[in-house]
Amino acid sequence: MDERTPSSPTSTAQPPVTTARVFAIAGPAMLANLTTPFLGVVATAAIGRLGESHLLGGVAMASVVFDCMFWLFGFLRMGTVALTAQAQGAGDAPEIRAVLLRAVLMSVVIGVALLIVQVPLSTAVFGLLGGSEAVTGAAKGYFAIRMWSAPFVLANYVLLGWLVGQARPGSALALQIVINAVNMIATVWLVLGLHAGITGAAIAAVIAEGAGCLAGAVVAWRLLGGRLSVTARTLLDRAQLSRMLAVNRDIMIRTAALIAAFLFFTAEGARAGDNTLAANAVLNNFMLIGAFFLDGLANAAEQLCGRSVGAGDRAGFTQAVRLVVIWGFVFAAAVTVLFVASGGPLIDLITTSPQVRETARIYIWLAALAPLCGVMAYAFDGVYIGATWSRDMRNLMIVSLGCYFAGWWLLKPFGNAGLWGALLVFLLARGLLQMARYRGLLRATFTGPDATPASLPR
């Protein structure tokens, strides 16, 4: 079964897609994104107060590894959002339950597999990163404990995706806040109160993810009315299992390409020197601010477009795309203006190094353009995920990565400015390529008698 046509939807009555519905989903997602950085600040501050730089470096190194590893398995959230929303749009309650169980089983299998390979994985990864002996030792100690949170983290991805897929972003936000709050409280208590060092920080992460998983399971159980009511035949439906695996495989490959792009950006910045690397890290925080808003809108696109596909509601689908793109440009323009107008003071707030401040000011105008260049990429990522156009999203991401490397090669004489220019090319390529493919996929997905030539959102 082609992932472009998940079913043969027959149009069913759906509530109109409005700005209010978009922000009912995007708003909580934006808030969840904004609360996440506080977790890193608290952990860094707690470890930093121990007064040993190798411990802080070890936690920072291990955290990067976990960020990339868990990001790679983000398909568990994205795929679950799409398949749940489509089942909801089709009014298929048994399939909504089955999606949850299938995805949870997949998360458990992956989580256990990670635990089994954690020792060789740790040796290989930290060997490649090449930190000092003290930093690497601290990182491995943190990694060995925090890895036990992996099954909980992946299950939480599924639970969050399942809640968002049913347009329950408030519950998803509450779950995210529980995880972050427990993590921050447990980190302070274990590291500073019980003097457990980085071991305490790692244990805090396990406790937080476990608490979040338990809370999410309770919420899911209540939403299911205290019963699963899924037959083995429905759960193990071969076509649905194959489709889920195909969608998740494609999203995983797409995410791996995205991770490669940002790791390459970091590596090239490091080759340019410590000041340039630090300046790029400062400016990357600005990009993240814009991404928080755009990613929230992408969440809305995943749910609304997925539900519209399940219901065969072409009008609702195109309206969701239109609103997400429009509001994406509004937020991106606001963030860009903020950076242009207040970039200098913001840089000074983040770093006290005169050299880093001076270097960051040189490239701030390029970082300020990132939200505007990335609007279409974020919006259409959400659209493609919701519609489960995952194969095309995967292929277009790989082409975009090629554009990124080509741009870097052509702009290499401009040094770090060329590196930032290549990143902007990457963002533009992702969005424009997906927009160009949108027409054909829309026609292929909504093949009913009302299928007429599609117009792009405007």
Image (cartoon, rainbow, N blue to C red):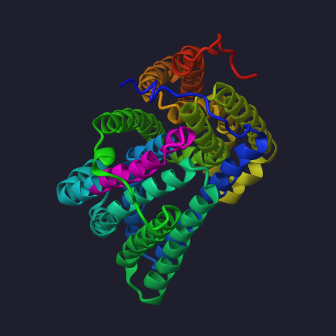
Please name whichever residue, 242 or 93, is drawn nearer the observer in this view of the structure.
Answer: 93
Q: Position of residue 214 (x, y in %)?
A: 43, 71
Q: Residue at x 60, y 14 (%)?
A: 449
Q: Which residues are magenta?
A: 84-108
The answer, for residue 44, to whether it is visible in the render is: no
Q: Quadrant of residue 36?
A: bottom right
Q: Is residue 281 magenta?
A: no
Q: Quadrant of residue 173?
A: bottom right
Q: Position of residue 278 (x, y in %)?
A: 54, 49
Q: Residue furthest top?
A: 453
For the N terminus, give its image quadrant: top left
Q: Residue at x 32, y 48 (%)?
A: 235
Please name whichever residue, 251 or 49, is drawn nearer the observer in this view of the structure.
Answer: 251
Q: Is residue 323 left or right of residue 144?
A: right
For the C terminus, give its image quadrant: top right
Q: Position of residue 276 (x, y in %)?
A: 54, 42
Image position of 337 with respect to 285: above or below: above
Image position of 457 with respect to 369: above or below: above
Q: Position of residue 108 (x, y in %)?
A: 29, 57
Task: State the predominant SS element of the stretch in magenta.
Answer: helix
Image position of 431 with respect to 225: above or below: above
Please name whichever residue, 89 or 321, is drawn nearer the observer in this view of the structure.
Answer: 89
Q: Residue at x 61, y 55 (%)?
A: 168
